[in-house]
Image (tube, helix red, strand yellow):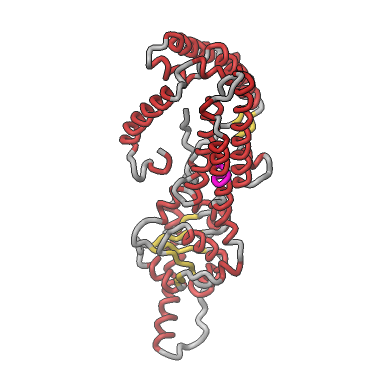
């Protein structure tokens, strides 16, 4: 259920919803004629391209939907499974699948749909599919070399082609529209007449214009991650952005007071963090702010989320990104950790205090200079090795 699980729909209810979605999907397939083998194999013989139209429409709809949901922050795209590409097994499997489709008249999904309404040939097709699964499972040691050959990893076509996600979405939509026009001409020649359903050119012109608008919308909704990462590289934008500040004295006081509402997001390199990790802190890369788990931590109510780095500008980059992602109670450490070291950890009293305020400040800083290194040492000893905060990909799919 995309972005709805588990925040809106619980994991248990998700299975119930999935059941009804599956029933509805099967009903739509049957009504579209996908339970009829003659209609399905028409793609290979040129007399009926309904399969191509349906699958390309579904692909374009899903693609634009994912782009839109990602752009508006409703979908954590890092959690979407991208099946790894094993080139040779994909080629061999594709050939076997294609032959099975054209000979048997069904694909795995449509065969179940057809069997559900009593088609005997679909039941035989399913039995053959199960036999094929059994042969592959039992003979896996023999097929393993081919199965794992040429591992290309989690390939994204637009990255492979060196183009933006928006441009690829536009080109794929344009290709789908071109294919719809082309197959209509092919059907007319093979059947000797134009299908009445597609005879109106006005309908095709209207749908083409609609598809063009949808394709262009991809440029209006660029990859949200790229857009936001680009914005925090703009020095003027970051410098002029209004972000709350927390002084070194306030941060030191909250640490010494064991403030349970304090969360420190350390943006330094791992080596620097290991050498000096403040209590209540955890290390993050800026990229982590797009992860669901980090987002949950930033969403805790009534927390003070303080971003620290050696310099204040780096802190502000992280804070600006967090605020642009919609998080609240974001602070940066004024003067950065370099200032914190100078004012707290390595404090040297400049002389005799001139007023009551300086007297209290110097007394507090001298106390903090002694206390906080002890707290840092205790915090380091408590921290057991943990797995990366970046959420793992969920191995799901059809």
* Left or right: 299 in relation to 351: left
For the stretch drawn in magenta, the main secondary structure is helix
Residue 179 visible, this angle: yes
Q: Is residue 145 visible?
A: no
The residue nearer to you, when weighing 382 against 355, is: 355
**At which x and y percent is residue 282?**
47, 55
Which quadrant would the N terminus be assigned to in this image?
top left
Q: Is residue 137 left or right of residue 93?
A: left
Q: Where is residue 306 shown, x and y percent of the image? A: 45, 64
**Relative to 149, does residue 360 appear above or below in the rendering?**
below
Q: Which residues are magenta?
A: 211-215
Q: Is 140 in front, or is 280? A: 140
Counting labels gives: 0
* Residue most extreme to the right: 162
- Observer-nearest of 240 and 190: 190
What residue occupies the far bottom of the structure in this picture? 354
Magenta-colored stretch includes residue 235: no
Identify which residue is drawn at 63% across, 30% down.
182
Image point (60%, 28%), residue name = 184
Measured along the vertical axis of the image, is residue 2 above or below residue 249?
A: above
Give percent across and percent down for residue 317: 55, 63
Q: Is residue 123 above or below residue 71?
A: above
Query: Which residue lies at the image location 36% right of the left edge and 45% below the top edge?
Result: 7
Please give the name of the residue rendered at 41% of the width and 14% of the height, measured from the top-left corner: 115
- Determine which quarter of the picture holds residue 173: top right
Residue 234: % across, % down: 61, 64
């Amino acid at each position: 259920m995309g972005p709805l699980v588990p925040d809106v729909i619980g994991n248990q209810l998700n299975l119930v919803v999935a059941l009804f979605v599956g029933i509805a999907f099967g009903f739509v397939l049957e009504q579209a004629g996908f339970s009829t083998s003659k209609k399905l194999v028409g793609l290979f013989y040129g007399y009926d391209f309904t399969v191509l139209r349906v699958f390309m429409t579904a692909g374009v709809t899903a693609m634009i939907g994912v782009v839109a949901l990602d752009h508006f922050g409703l979908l954590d795209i890092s959690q979407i499974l991208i099946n790894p590409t094993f080139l040779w097994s994909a080629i061999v499997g594709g050939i076997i699948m294609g032959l099975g489709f054209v000979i048997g008249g069904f694909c795995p999904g449509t065969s179940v749909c057809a069997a559900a309404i009593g088609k005997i040939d679909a039941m035989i097709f399913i039995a053959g599919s199960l036999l094929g699964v059994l042969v592959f499972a039992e003979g896996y040691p023999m097929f393993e070399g081919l199965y794992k050959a040429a591992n290309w990893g989690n390939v994204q076509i637009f990255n492979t082609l060196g183009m933006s996600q928006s441009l690829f979405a536009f080109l794929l939509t344009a290709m789908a529209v071109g294919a719809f026009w082309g197959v209509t001409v092919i059907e007319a020649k093979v059947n000797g007449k134009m299908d009445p359903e597609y005879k109106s050119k006005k309908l095709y012109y209207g749908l083409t214009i609609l598809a063009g608008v949808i394709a262009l919308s991809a440029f209006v909704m660029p990859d949200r991650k790229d857009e936001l990462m680009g914005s925090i590289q703009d020095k003027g934008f970051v410098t002029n952005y209004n972000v709350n500040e927390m002084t070194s004295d306030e941060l030191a006081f909250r640490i010494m007071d064991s403030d349970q509402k304090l969360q420190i997001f350390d943006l330094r390199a791992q080596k620097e963090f290991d050498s000096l990790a403040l209590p209540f802190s955890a290390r993050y890369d800026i990229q982590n702010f797009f992860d669901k788990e980090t987002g949950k931590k930033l969403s805790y109510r009534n927390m003070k989320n303080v971003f620290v780095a050696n310099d204040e500008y780096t802190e502000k980059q992280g804070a600006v990104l967090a605020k642009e992602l919609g998080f609240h109670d974001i602070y940066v450490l004024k003067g950065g950790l370099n200032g914190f070291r100078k004012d707290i950890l390595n404090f040297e009293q400049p002389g005799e205090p001139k007023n009551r305020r300086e007297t209290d400040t110097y007394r507090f800083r001298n106390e903090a200079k002694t206390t906080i290194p002890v707290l840092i040492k205790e915090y380091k000893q408590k921290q057991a090795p943990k797995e990366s905060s970046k959420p793992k990909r969920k191995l799901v799919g059809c």
